[in-house]
Structures are given as C-alpha cells and as structure tokens.
Image: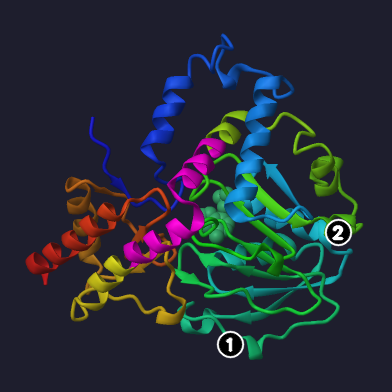
C-alpha cells in the first residue's frame, strides 16, 4: 500500500495515524464487544468519546467557557441557513462581506427570511482581494456581520478578524479552523464543516457565545434551534457518532503534534513552498490574489494555457500528487494544504511544478 499526497479541498487528507487507529478500533472499541459505530449515543462509551472530543477541541482552540460548542449534521451550508433563523428577527438586517464563492452561498441561504445585505464584495476584481474595512457598509441595527475567514475556492483569507463594534462577527472557518491560533473572543460565532481540518465530512462545529443563544430568532422547528441543541449537548436526535469519533481522534492528534502554534508554523512553510514555486516561475504559474490575503490553506493557480491543466493533473497523479484539479467555478489548479498535509507533500508539489514547467514551458 502506498498513500499518495492528497491535495483534495475536502473531504480531504486525514492523518495516517488517525485512520490506523480507526481501523484498529473498527471491529471492537476497547473491550466493549462492539464498534463505536454500533453503540447507542446515550451509552457511556460514546458519551465519553463525545465529551472528550469537545474538551480537546476547547483546549486546541482555547475556547472560553462562555462559548457553547455544538456538533451538528448537515454541513456548513445548513449552518448558513440556520444562522438567520437562530440569530435574526424576521426581516432583520444582517451584513455579509463577500470575498468569494462561499460568502455568496452564505447570503443565498439567508436572504429568504432576513434583509441580507452585501456590506462589501470582492467580486469586481474576481475575488483577488478583501475590500478595505473602511469601505464596508455596516448597519448598527444588523443582527450580525458575516465573513468567510478563508475562501476555499478563491484562495483568499483574512489576515486578522475585522472589528465590527457591537454587532457580533460570525465567521465561516470551514477551511481554516485550527490552521493557526485564533482569538475566539473576537467572534460571536464561528462555524466549520469538519471535512478539511477537523476530520471527516458528516459533522460540523458551531462555537457560539452563549448570550447570543438567548436571541428569539424566528419560528423554527426545535431540531433547528441552537439553544435547544446546546441544552442537550448536541443530542436532540441521534448525532453522527462515527464522524464525531473520527473528529475526536483528529483533534487529539493535533494536540499531540503541538497544537495550533505548531500548525501555524508548519502551514506557513508549506504555503511558502508552493507560492515560491508560483512566483518564481517567471509567469508560467499565476496566482492573482493580493499577497496580503493569500490563503495558507488553499492555493489556486493557473497555467499559461487551459489545455495544460489536464496534463498537469494527470502527470501529478502519476507522481503521487492527488486531486489538484481546480474548482469548476474558477478552473486551473488548486492545492489544498490542510493540517494533515506534511511539509514533504508541499515540497513534492513544488518540485513537480518546476519539473512540469521545464517540460512544458
Ligand atoms: N464554506 C466553506 C468555506 C467551504 O469551503 C465549504 C465547502 N467546501 C462550505 C462552506 C460548504 O460546506 P458543506 O459542503 O459542508 O455544506
């Protein structure tokens, strides 16, 4: 067996040790006589797994006690639809800063039940920069300000949390959570699908300041009510237990590796290797994103001619570098460098890029 370097944007590469542990525990969890995936979510084994995962995530991200941590099914898109129902009154204003594709989906999911405004957008320049904070059109009466910390497709990432005064900042961290230290207190709410940095698809995380859970929001079924979910430890119904277990293993692995400080340093080196391969190519490879907001996690880039894309992707795959095809919305190539991607993977990609240029440039 040989595991390749997998640059998939998500579901994405997981640490091999995590997969091996899951494999070893698949038939029998400890001495329980059954797999964790076969046990009740109300039983002592799973309750221990679930609460350890939460404790470890709290430690990893330094989540203060006055923030609740919810584990949800339905992915980040479902969270985008539930934010207005939980935190805005019917028709109330909420401000969205759109810096790429996922900011657009966030506003699309919200606009049917609130007055969702585009407070600023990077669309005019093809989402290659983040509009300056001074130009954002924010309302003091907005329920929240929504940003996408890292745009997975366009490769644009906030360098710091923007100030939004008394209006809470809600941030989609799907593709950047745990990639570097973050100050949770700067946000009212942080959410992320797990399938990039936290583990497998099928489970997401919502980190929310507890006082915001008091907001009445809008008429909704109890299963869509985050306050109810928080009160019942994310178990209003059967949670995705296997995914929660795998998330727990992945978070534990990140702590053992040295936590978010470790990954920030490692991720900076990985991204530098690939950006240097782009910037040092004399224009053969291009990434048009403003260097101040270039993503550390997802690096889209373009070849001189679109017909080279398929050859690049196929030859990379043959060289053990998987899933480099760009998202269809932008084309080209995309390398995702999540926490589980080792430095050797980024270096192998940079070396492949130089070699490919030599033969095709
Ligand atoms: N937000 C961001 C930043 C994403 O990268 C993605 C998925 N790639 C989503 C939202 C949507 O996530 P999901 O497929 O879990 O709904």
Give how far apart the Cα atoms at labels 2 and 1 are: 30 Å
Q: Dot 2 corresponds to which residue?
A: 211
Q: Quadrant of residue 14?
A: top left
In the rendered view, tell whether residue 195 sits above or below residue 121. above
Query: Residue 218 placed where, x, y %?
Result: 89, 56
Task: In the displayed orientation, state which residue is furthest to the left.
Answer: 359
Q: Residue at x 17, y 46 (%)?
A: 318
Q: Residue at x 29, y 76 (%)?
A: 286
- Left or right? Give the position of 291 relative to 272: right
Q: Dot 1 corresponds to which residue?
A: 132
In the rendered view, tell whether residue 338 sits above or below residue 155. above
Q: Residue at x 72, y 29 (%)?
A: 238
* Secondary structure type for disc 2: helix
Circle 1 residues within 10 Å: few <14, some 14–19, many ≥20: few
Q: Residue at x 65, y 49 (%)?
A: 58
Report the image quarter containing ligand 1. Answer: bottom right
Query: Residue 235 placed where, x, y %?
Result: 76, 34
Residue 75 appears in the rendering = no
User: Which mark is on residue 12?
Assistant: none
Query: Residue 12 placed where, x, y %?
Result: 42, 46
Towards the viewer: 342 or 118: 342
Query: Residue 269 placed where, x, y %?
Result: 33, 65
Q: Is residue 310 magenta?
A: no
Q: Which residues are magenta?
A: 247-271
């Amino acid at each position: 067996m040989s595991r390749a370097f997998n640059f998939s944007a998500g579901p994405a590469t997981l640490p091999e040790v995590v997969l091996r542990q899951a494999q070893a525990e698949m038939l029998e969890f400890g001495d329980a006589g059954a797999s964790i995936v076969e046990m009740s979510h109300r039983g002592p084994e799973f309750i221990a797994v679930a609460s350890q995962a939460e404790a470890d995530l709290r430690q990893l991200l330094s989540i203060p006690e006055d923030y609740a941590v919810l584990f949800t099914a339905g992915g980040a898109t479902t969270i985008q639809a539930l934010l207005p129902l939980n935190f805005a009154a019917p028709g109330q204003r909420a401000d969205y800063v759109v810096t790429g594709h996922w900011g657009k989906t966030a506003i699309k999911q919200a606009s049917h039940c609130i007055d969702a405004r585009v407070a600023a957008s990077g669309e005019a320049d093809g989402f290659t920069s983040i509009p300056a904070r001074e130009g954002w059109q924010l309302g003091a009466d907005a329920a929240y300000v929504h940003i996408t910390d890292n745009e997975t497709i366009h490769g644009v990432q906030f360098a710091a949390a923007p100030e939004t005064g008394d209006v809470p900042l809600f941030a989609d961290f799907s593709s950047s959570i745990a990639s570097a230290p973050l100050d949770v207190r700067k946000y009212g709410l942080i959410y992320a699908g797990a399938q990039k940095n936290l583990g497998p698809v099928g489970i997401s995380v919502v980190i929310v300041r507890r006082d915001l859970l008091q907001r009445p929001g809008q008429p909704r079924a109890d299963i869509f009510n985050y306050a109810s979910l928080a009160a019942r430890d994310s178990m209003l119904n059967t949670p995705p237990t296997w995914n929660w277990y795998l998330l727990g293993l992945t978070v534990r692995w990140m702590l053992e590796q040295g936590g978010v400080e470790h990954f920030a340093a490692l991720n900076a080196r990985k991204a530098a290797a690939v950006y240097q391969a782009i910037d040092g190519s004399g224009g053969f490879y291009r990434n048009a994103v403003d260097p101040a907001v270039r993503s550390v996690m997802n690096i889209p880039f373009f070849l001189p001619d679109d017909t080279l894309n398929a050859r690049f992707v196929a030859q990379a795959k043959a060289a053990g570098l998987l899933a480099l095809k760009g998202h269809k919305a932008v084309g080209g190539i995309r390398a995702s460098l999540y926490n589980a991607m080792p430095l050797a993977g980024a270096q192998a990609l940079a070396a492949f890029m130089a070699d490919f240029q030599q033969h095709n440039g």
